[in-house]
Image (cartoon, rainbow, N blue to C red):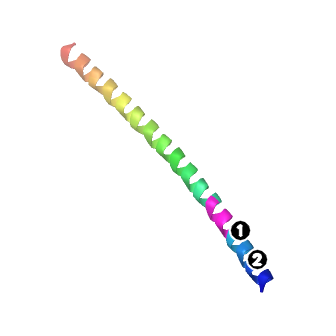
Amino acid sequence: MDNEILDLLKTINNKLDEHTQILRSLEHASEIHKAEIDKVNYTAAKIEGEVKGIREDLTTG
């Protein structure tokens, strides 16, 4: 009986370790995704500023 319980606990512990690794991988992927979105937003804002500057130059020029 004790061996069965120990085997069950080992199985549960292995699953827990596996789930922890999966969650950490997902968290890492989420952080990378957020960084990529931030970069795209920064680039879009930079382009928007450049377009505004060009429009002002064309309007006043």
Circle 1: is it few (<14), some (14-19), or many (20+) Cα within 10 Å?
A: few
Magenta segment range? 15-20
Position of residue 3 measured from the top left corner of the image (x, y, whole percent): 80, 81
* Residue at x-position 47% and y-position 45%: 34
Position of residue 27 measured from the top left corner of the image (x, y, whole percent): 55, 52
* Residue at x-position 19% and y-position 14%: 60
Identify the disc placed on residue 6. 2
Gap in angstroms between the C-alphas marked 2 and 1: 12 Å
* Residue at x-position 35% and y-position 32%: 45
Residue 48 quadrant = top left
Residue located beneath label 1 in the image? 14
Q: Is residue 10 above or below residue 27?
A: below
Q: Nearer the viewer, residue 29 or 22?
A: 22
Does the magenta stretch mainly form a helix, a strand or a loop?
helix
Q: Is residue 48 above or below residue 4?
A: above
Q: Amino acid at mark 2?
A: Leu
Between circles 2 and 1, the one closer to the viewer is: 2
Quadrant occupied by the N terminus: bottom right
Circle 2: is it few (<14), some (14-19), or many (20+) Cα within 10 Å?
A: few
Disc 2 is placed on an element classified as: helix
Say whether residue 22 is magenta.
no
* Residue at x-position 58% and y-position 58%: 23
Q: Please give left or right for residue 43 compared with residue 1 in the image.
A: left
Disc 1 is placed on an element classified as: helix
